[in-house]
Image (cartoon, rainbow, N blue to C red):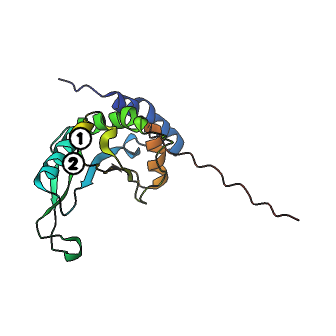
Amino acid sequence: MSKQLTPLQKHYIETVVPALTTSRGYLNVHQVPKLSKIVLNTGIGAEADKTIIADTARDMGLIAGQKPVLNRSKKAIANFKLKPNQITGCHVTLRGENMWHFFMRLLAVALPSIRDFRGVPNKLDGQGNYTIGITDFTIFPEIVVENNKRSMGLDITFVTSAETDDEAREFLKLMGMPFRRIDPVPAKTTAA
């Protein structure tokens, strides 16, 4: 029984791999950067009660399509009112088919629904990975705004097999990531 490819996987195989092989001069298809995983992470806060934790975990599960893992503190920090083993957030690691479906929903539905959207920042981490910070998770259609008592932010990290930021940027751009256009800085003119 063969697996059905998502439209984004087909795009990767049919368009991105040949384009990167040509532009970068790769000798082998396995040298072409690929998406390893997508990690979603959110913080809840040290003073969150059980209902906020449950709501956040539920919403994260709806967005990701799988159950999140709760993050717990390792030690006490008095300034942040943090106790050992206290829940501080949750995260989900997406791989395989779930990863591709989430990436497609992010590009086609969530990012375009942001008001005055002009693209995502063009900065990678130096190792070929890319992180987007979403300030309001209600851009995802799975979230019902009326059920949420507080706004939640979300970090989305794309882990690629690229060795450099330039490779990863070109790969993500070919995949459809709407990077913000960098306008050239006009030269300063001196008055005589």
* x and y percentages locating residue 71 in the rendered image: 17, 58
- Which image quadrant for residue 175? top left
First in sequence: mark 2 vs mark 1: 1
Q: Amino acid at mark 2?
A: Val
- Answer with left or right where residue 66 lies relative to residue 128: left
Which structural element holds mark 2?
Answer: strand
- Return the residue found at the far right: 192
* x and y percentages locating residue 20 in the rendered image: 48, 40
Badge 2, how many Cα within 10 Å: few under 14, some, many 20+?
many
Q: Is residue 73 above or below residue 177?
A: below
Q: Amino acid at mark 1?
A: Ala
Residue at 71%, 54% in the rendered image = 186
Q: Nearer the viewer, residue 55 or 41?
A: 55
The residues bearing labels 2 and 1 have C-alpha atoms spaced at a distance of: 7 Å
* x and y percentages locating residue 26 in the rendered image: 46, 44
Q: Quadrant of the N terminus?
A: top left
Residue at 17%, 51% in the rendered image = 52
CB atoms at circles 2 and 1 under 8 Å apart?
yes
Q: In the drawing, what numbered circle is on residue 64?
A: 1
Q: Is residue 143 visible?
A: no
Residue at 41%, 59% in the rendered image = 125
* x and y percentages locating residue 118 in the rendered image: 51, 42
Q: In the drawing, what numbered circle is on residue 92?
A: 2
